[in-house]
Every structure is written in structure tokens, then in C-alpha cells.
Image: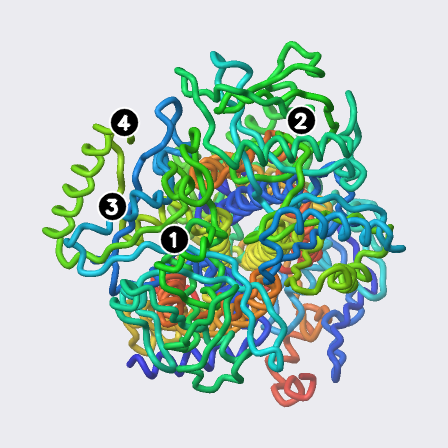
Amino acid sequence: MHLGPLVRAMLRNKVRFGLLAVEVALTLAIVANCVSLILEARRELTRPSGFVDEQLLLVTATPFNEAFREVAYRDTIVDQDLAALRAHPAIETATNSGFLPWQGGGSSTMYRRDSKAELVRTQIYAADEKLLDTLGVRLVEGRAFTREDVLRNTEQLRALNDTERQRDASGLAAVKVTVPAIISKAYAQLMFPEGQPLGKTFEDEDGDRWQVIGVIDTFYNPYAWKIGEYATFYPRRQGSYEGGTSYLVRVKPGQLTAVEKGVEGVLAGVNANRTYRVRTVPDVKRRFLGSQTLMVRLLSIVIVVLVFVTGLGIMGLTSFSVAERTRQIGTRRALGADRAAILKHFLLENWITTTVGIVLGVGLAITLNMTLLSEVDGPKITPGLLAIGAALLWLAGLLATLWPALRGARVAPAEATRNI
Amino acid sequence: MLLHNIWIAWKSLKRSPTLSLLIVSCIALGIAFATTFATVRHAFTKHPLPDKEPVLRYVRLDNWDPRTAYPGDSLNSLPPQVTYRDAMELRRSTLPARQTPTFRALLTVIPDPAISRPSREDIRLAESDFFEMFQVPFRYGGPWTREADTKQEHVIVLSERLNERLFGGRNSVGQTLKIETRDFRIVGVLAGWQPTVRMYDMTGSALSEPEAVFMPFAMAVPMQIRTAGNSDGWGTQAGTGVAGFLNSETSWLQYWVELRSPADEAAYRSFVESYITDQKKVGRFARPMNYRVSSIATLMTDFQIAPKETFALLLVGLLFLAVAAVNLIGLLLGKFLARANEVGVRRALGASRRDVFMQHLVECQVVAVLGGAIGVVLAAVSLRALNAYMLDMTNRAGLFSLDFRMLLLALALSITAGLISGVYPAWRICRLAPANHLKV
Amino acid sequence: MLSMSKIRKIYRTQLVETYALDEITLDVLAGEFVAVMGRSGSGKTTFLNVAGLLDTFESGTYTLDGQDVSRLSDREMSRIRNEKIGFIFQSFNLIPDLDVFDNVDVPLRYRRMPAKERKERVERAVEMVGLSSRLRHLPSQLSGGQQQRVAIARVLAGDPKLILADEPTGNLDTLMSREVMDLLERIHEEGTTIIMVTHSPECAARAPRHIHLLDGRVLDTDAQLFEERTLPSLAAAIQ
């Protein structure tokens, strides 16, 4: 329409329009990257563990009475603890295990298929027959541990640790034991890519065999290394004199606070010569994800304020631009432009500026993204995100220009004949 | 002239209140964001012990599995801690002016039943040199002596917090405290030690606060104290029980040395190398020669203490300031050009272009400094809110604070923004021919 | 061509009501060259604004080229300005960011004329005012006289029926003034109606017909002028 002269005139005012374009470009770059970071953080924040997080807590009882040095004594206490916990009206069930989800760590080790295969790392935790019920995970194959598994395996492993093991030529144990294990589906797929993991075995560095008796469905516990989805559970009485004994407790729905306060009393009722530490999974999760949540909030604030500031900037710059040209507007009106033509003129000017800014902004967004990724692991920026950002800025630019442009359209034709 | 220009600038600001408000808030927001995020990053990157940077060194040895490298990136391809046997061997060197192995444990503290119930507390085991090395401040008493280490005396140092809880904050030196099954004599109480980063042990959370009790390292074996920190091991353990553990390839200790000069450091490195070479002869250290003797600063980078998100935030903050500056250029341009008439008068009265330029540049600076001051206040408020949030998360109060360096940064950013934004508008307006803008 | 009857234009402020045009009645026939004269404050500019549909009026009727333009919409008025009227301003009013070609082109663009036709008209108009060599120059690169000639080219390109000129030589020296007035005369000879507001006697001399305005009213030519000259006290009283 009036594109040619309009663009030529804009080119003679490069600074004025260039400033706006640069501002739009910077805004697009910042907003696109912030949104990208927010989406990534949210992905972390909303990732399911596969457990009934809201109903879980870990209580650790550490003794300071010498009697606890006796293994048999400790075992009796553990049985009494579990009985008391499982009988509690607000508690669904409990398992003797040190696994605390959402800590960001735990214990891990490496296994391999056989002596020729590569070692693969996995999280590893001891637990008893109530593990699956406590966590609320589903078995997709096989079975859970039984009480016999726990007792038998505990005895087996304790016997091993009591004496020095005989080793054969290759450094492996001369007499190998078999430990039943429940593994996560992801680890099963890693260890046995061909499928059918049930019944198969893998070995540890001593040569002992670990036999898959069960496979569980979703498992995710974030870890310092990338093994969040790999887990191996084995049946064993958990606990020691120095480290105390831990119970992962599943409370009935809505009872978490009540049990958090009362569980110490339950265990003290069994034996009071211990110190107790209670951590609820929601709390632990909140602390672990705390920095992510903070990021999301901070970045959201940045986005809102930035778009607001840029919008005001566009409005301000356009206002000045219009105010400076009242005489020109009057002249155009005298030459035959109606109000709509003037309005369109300013909207078009702004649209061109915004578009130039967006084009620049895409390049800037990608550069900024690459700089960020060199330090932070994060997602690369997607074209979809840039497209949405561009659309948003076009809209924001339009809205911000509307008021000054309407003001401009209202300038009277008589401005043309006004003496200075 | 400068004072006069500042006075003119102030009057000009008062004359157009809404525009001035807009201009000042623009800069204020930009400085607020930039300063806030810079402070957050600064909290994690600033050196906790700058005086000791040239002398304190942390030892890492690659005793890992010959079949695979330690899992970690190129900077961290070796275990972050050392084994017990290696620590004991390292101790033999007389090169360091001071040295200490150290680790964190969780033990039951059993105070007088009248005062408090037993509780599990974080205990740090270290040798007497630890306190001098890390400039730990004392309120009462002092560290135990090197002799106490050698003689395996039952002595401890309490943190201020624990002393508050158990002894009401009084001088508890000389009193006894039972830990696990043994009685310990208190020889010192700390004076509120809260380094931003727990630099003597960066293997866990960098933000953890210092431990509640400090105990001689020599207690580890007789009391069979296990680490409550991380440990990494590989291979099979020869021997069972505690003895087996202490002899294994499991690394669980932090080892620090203080070396007086670069020459000493070079000599120490040779010592470490020859130690590794010797151990290779008995079949240990099967991996290629790899060890680190790192300063605190290097360690902070290697372990990536500063959460990566803080870098992203810093970048965003600075870019936001850039947007605010661009915005400012536009606003200033508009404001100045609208006053072309006044400028025409000044020029007619004899002001040179330089005078006009300087006058307007000063106005930009006044705006920038004013906005910067408001921005700093905003930043202080935001940081306080962030502190409250972090207190909930990490139990640390006052993690983020506007220290002198950050205030200086804010000032520098304000002035720079003012200069960059102001130069073009001031130049444009000083170039206007007066005649065109005087009402004839 | 132009016929005004009892046109009244009032400017209202908070305290005062000013009758800028007080029941003006006049006619201009097609092809006339009229000079409208009067001291400042007489309503010359207001008259031009109303005549050129740059401003509205409170009461009266205004017929332009046979059409009653008293109560038209903004769009309709803009159209008439674009097609039937051509303006020449005292301060030239060229658009500073556009070159000569684009400046002359402006009114043609509002007419949605196809590019080829526009180009022809512009080039022809610019040639008529003798500035073909400066087609791509910016107004800042032209002298006052040249700028006004470009403004005239802008008018010519549109080929209007009525030209309204507001002190066309007000900002020019004697030589340039003469050039501009020569152009205007030539245009008049081709049959265009010209109404020129001026207070320069030299310019007015070029126009065959004079109209005098005083306090928003048309003076009954010679009679009232004579009174003004010979009865200063009365003239003072009339003021």
C-alpha cells in the first residue's frame, strides 16, 4: 500500500526505529529462553516417582544403649517396631528399609550380566516383604519378597561378612551366593535388552549372583548420576548399631502430619534408648525441588516485568514519535488521508519495526540459548517456542502502539496551517 | 558547573513528574534485577577464605578401578575423597606446615538428662591443625593441641548453636559431654561460624552449615566411627569388619594441607607422585597416574558449587538491564527533544554545544544514580524475601546479602547504564541548531 | 465553485467565546484567482481552514463545486480534500523523511492510483516546476523556494479544481517569491480556481480579485476600506 515511502522514511530514522527493534529483539531472546528454562524446570517438578509420596515418611531410630550391639537384640527390636507400626490405626503399613525417595541421592553400586559384560550402575536398597505395599508400586512381573526371603537372605549375607571370603584365581569369591532381587523395569531393559528378565541373573564384583524374582513398574528417584530410573531391591534386615535402623512408613491418606508427630512415641514405646529422626517425603521433596521452584518463580517474574517494561517502552517511543510529527499528520490529512489511513500508517510502522526486532530476536535467542547451555544443562530452544514468542510480541507491540496511534489519528487537519 | 548541572537536572525532573517517574523506574527495575541476581550468584562464587587461597590445598588421588574411570566429567574423573590408608600415608609428609584428614559423622550426643534428651548430631572429626587452617573463630577456649591428637585425648569443641542449646550459651569449657559411650571434655566453643560455602568439605551440599561438634580424628578408629558423608568404593574388600574397611579402596576422607610457598607445593606434588609410584609397585593405583592438589577456588569450580541456575539468572538479570537501558534511550530522546525550545534559549544565551552536552549527560547520570539507588533498595527487599525462602529450604539465615562489592557493582552498573543510555540523546540535542527551535 | 453563506466558526475556551468567522458570506466562481487579505487575527487562516475542510463550522452552509459539504463525515471530507482541493502552505509542509518524488506522490497514494500512473503524474508535475534534477533529494537539501515549488508540484500532480494557498511566499525572499507567483499565475491560466491568503501587497497585486476580512467578517470592499483609512477613530472603535 504505502510500503515503499514508509520504509524509505523509516530508514532515514534508523536510530529511532532501531532502538525499538533492538528492544523487541532483546525481549524475545530473554522471554524465549526463560520460558524454555521454566518448562524444563516444570518437567522436573512434575515428574512422578511412581510412589505414594504424600503418604510416606522415613523414621530412623539410632540406639545409644550398648545392648543394641547384639545382632539378635536388634532383630527382636526391629520385629517389635514393625509390629507396633503396622498395628497403628493411622498407619497403612511399614517396611524395614533405608530408602528415602526424593533425597537426590542414596546408595548405588554396579552390576554386570556376566564376567564378560560391562558394569552398569544402579541404585540399591535393602527392604523387606512389605516394600511394594509401602511404596505403592506395581509389579509387572514376578512376585514380591516373602518373609522367608528376608530371613534367609539376611542370614546368608551376615555369614559372608563375618569371615574373610575365599577367592579363586580371577578374584571372584570361591563360594558364590544367590540373592533374590526386585528390579525396576528400566534397569531390566538395560541389563536384559532381549526381554524376559524374570528368573535371569546378573552378578556383582564378587561373582555373587542376583536373581530377578520381580520387576516393578514406574520407578524414579533423582540421583546425582543419571541412574534415576534404575533400582535394585534385595531382601534383608536393614540397620546397624552406628547408623540406626530405618523404617519407611506408609500412612493412611491424610494422616501424614499426625503420624509425623506420633511415630516417635510409637517407637519409644517399644524401646526408649534411641534417638529418632523423622523425615516426611513431601518435605524432602520440597527441599530437593526447592531450587527448581524458586527458578520457576523468579523467571516468571522476569517475564512478566519484562513484557510490561517493553510494552511501556513501545508505547512511550511511539507516543514521542507521533507527537513529533503532528504537523506532518495534519499535512497528510490535508492532502486527503482520513483517520483510518493515519492509524494504519502508525500501526504499519510499528509492525515493521516489531518484525525486524523479531528477526533479530530469533538470532539473539539462539545465541543466548547456546551461551546458557554451555554452563547449564537445559533444553535447546524449539522453533515452536520462538514462533509463540514472536506471536506474543507482535500482539504486545500492536496493543502498545494502539493508543499512541489512535491519538495520532485524532490530530486535526488544521494542524497543517497552524503557525509555529 | 557540575553542581549547577545537577541542580538543573533536579528541577527538570520535578517539572515533568510522570515522565520522570517512568524514566527513573525504568532504570530502577533494571538495576534491581541485575543486582539481585548478581548477588545470588556472588553468594556461591565468592571465595570463603581469600587469605588462605595461596596456601590451602586439597588432595585427590585416582585409586579407582582400572577397568573404568570414576564416573564424572573430565574435571572430576577421579574420586573426590581419599581412602584411609592413603590419608595415613600422606600424613607422613613433613612438607605441609599444617595438615589434616577430616570427615563428618553422625553420633548420639547424650547431655545431662536434666537439660535435654539425647540427640543425633553432625560431628566433624579432624586434627588440631584444622582450626588454624580454616580460620575458625572461637568464643571460649580454643582448639585442642597436636599432642591431644597424638595422645588420643577425649576432647571436643562445640558450635555456638549447640552450646546455646546445652549450656545456655555460657562458657562451657572444662565441662563434660557424653557422646555415644564416652565422655569428652569441652576445650572450646565457636563464635558463630557461618561460611557461605562449607569449603572444608565440598563433597556434599555446599550450603550445609558447619557441624555441631568437632572431635579429634584419632577417635575414628577406637570408636569405630563411620562417615555420614559420601563414600565411593570399588572392587572387593579384603578383610572384614572395621579393619577391612579401613584398608579398602573406599574413599571417604577429605585431606587438606597447608603449604607455605610455591616451592613447597612443588615439592609436595613430587611427594604425592612418588607415593603413587610406590603404591603401583604393590599393585594399587592401577589407573594412569592421576592426582590433584587443588586450591579452594579450583575445587569450587571443579565441584561446580555454584548451582548452574544462578548463571542463567545472572545472564537474565544483565540482559534485563540492557532492555531497560534501551528503553531509557528512547525515553530520554523524547524528553530532551521535547525541550528543544529551552535548549535553543540556552544556546542563544551563549551555551556552547559542549555545555549543552554536559548538562544533559549530567541529567542522565542524575537519573541513573537516583534510579540505581531505588533499584538497590528494591534489590535489598527482594534479597530479604529470597533469604526467607532459602531459610526454609536450607536452614541458613542471611545467605544473600548486599556486601560492599555488590553495592559497588550496582553503582558501576547505574553509572554505565546512565552513560550508555545518555550519550546519544545528549549528543542529539546539543547538535540542534538553536534558531530552528526558538519561537520567532 | 465555492459558495459560503452565513458561516460561523466559534472558538471556545473556558472563559471566552471568540467568533473567528462571524456570518461570512461569499462566492468564488470557477476559474477565479482571489486574494484574501486582512491583518493577523482577522480570521484569514480560519477561513482557509473552513474553506479547505480542514476544520468544521458551527452554522451556515458551504457549497463546494456544487456539493453541500456542510455536514460530511471525516472520510468524505478527506476524499474531497484529496481529489478536489490542493494546498500550498506558508512553511511548505513537506514531509522531511521523504524525498521529492515521494513527497509529491503522497496525495496520489491516498487516491489508490496504480503505480505507473502515479509515476507519470509525479514526474510531469516535478518537471513543470523545473526540479526534475532533484527528484531524489530530501527537503533538507533544497532551498526555501525549491521546497515551495515541490509543494506546488504536489498540488499539480493531483490536478485539483481548487487551490488554497496560505501565505505562499511568506517564508521566501523576493526572487523566489516572484518565481512562485509566476507559477501560480500559470496554473491559474490553465483554468484552476485559486484562493490565496496573503498580506503581501505584491502578491495580492497578481490576483484580479481581492477580498478583505476583518474580525471574521468580509469587508464591503472599497467602502469599508475607505472608512478605515479616513476615519481612524471609527476604525479604532470598530476594532
Counting other residues with Cα less than 10 Å from the Cα at mark 2, is it few (<14), some (14-19), or many (20 or more)? many
User: Hey, what amino acid is under mark 4?
Assistant: Gly
Label 1 to label 3: alpha-carbon separation:
106 Å
The location of residue B142, given as percent across then percent down, is 32, 77
**Vertical relation: A419 (above or below) A112:** below
Q: Please tell me whether mark 2 sits on a helix, a strand or a loop.
A: strand
Q: Nearer the viewer, residue B189 or A190?
A: B189
The residue carrying mark 1 is C175
As drawn, which residue projects farthest toward the top? A194
The numbered mark, 3 or 4, whose residue comes first in the sequence reads 3
The location of residue B377, given as percent across then percent down, is 51, 74
In this rendering, which labeled residue sits more in front, label 1 or label 2? Answer: 2
Q: Please tell me whether mark 3 sits on a helix, a strand or a loop.
A: helix
User: Hey, what amino acid is under mark 2?
Assistant: Ala
The residue under the point 50% across, 43% down is A10
Evaluate whether residue A397 shows in this view: yes
**Vertical relation: C14 (above or below) C166:** below
Q: Is residue A36 left or right of residue B345?
A: right
The residue carrying mark 2 is A181
User: Hey, what amino acid is under mark 3?
Assistant: Glu
Q: Please tell me whether mark 1 sits on a helix, a strand or a loop.
A: helix
In this rendering, which labeled residue sits more in front, label 1 or label 4? Answer: 4
The residue carrying mark 3 is B89
Label 1 to label 2: alpha-carbon separation:
108 Å
The residue carrying mark 4 is B283
Label 2 to label 4: alpha-carbon separation:
34 Å
